[in-house]
Image (tube, rainbow, N blue to C red):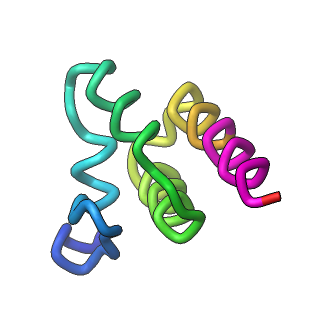
């Protein structure tokens, strides 16, 4: 497992680990909502798949990906 300093960050400076590890689900939801690019989103999906594999979180990430795609068109 990579340590958090090896993981890519976005302009907010948060790593996927920082976005997806809070114990408060509201914080996780907020962190997912503030993802604005596919590179960050893919890093978060990869992190979640490599670690906890929570279906609900992966669904939220998928929904956010769909939103980002629709904003780009």
Between 61 and 21, the residue placed more toward the observer is 61
| Picture residue at 56% right of the left edge, 25% below the top | 56
Residue 33: percent from the left, percent from the top?
45, 37
Which corner quadrant holds the C terminus?
Answer: bottom right
Q: Please, is residue 8 above or below residue 45 in the view?
A: below
Q: Quadrant of residue 52?
A: top left
Between 35 and 53, the residue placed more toward the observer is 35
Does residue 54 appear left or right of residue 17 in this picture? right
| Picture residue at 27% right of the left edge, 74% below the top | 2
Q: Quadrant of residue 16?
A: bottom left
Q: Furthest residue to the bottom?
A: 6
| Picture residue at 67% right of the left edge, 36% below the top | 63
Q: Main secondary structure of the magenta part?
A: helix
Is residue 64 rendered magenta in the image?
yes
Is residue 62 rendered magenta in the image?
no
How many numbered marks have been drawn onto this rendered protein structure? 0
Q: Please, is residue 70 above or below residue 16 in the view?
A: above
Q: Quadrant of residue 12?
A: bottom left
Q: Please, is residue 55 above or below residue 67 in the view?
A: above
Does residue 59 appear left or right of residue 51 in this picture? right
Residue 61: percent from the left, percent from the top?
57, 42
Which corner quadrant holds the N terminus?
Answer: bottom left
Start and end of the magenta stretch? 63-72
């Amino acid at each position: 497992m990579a340590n958090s300093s090896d993981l890519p960050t976005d302009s907010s400076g948060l790593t996927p680990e920082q976005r997806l590890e809070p114990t408060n689900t509201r914080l996780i939801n907020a962190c997912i909502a503030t993802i604005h690019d596919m590179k960050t989103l893919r890093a978060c999906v990869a992190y979640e798949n490599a670690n906890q594999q929570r279906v609900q979180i992966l669904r939220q990430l998928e929904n956010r990906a769909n939103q980002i795609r629709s904003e780009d068109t």
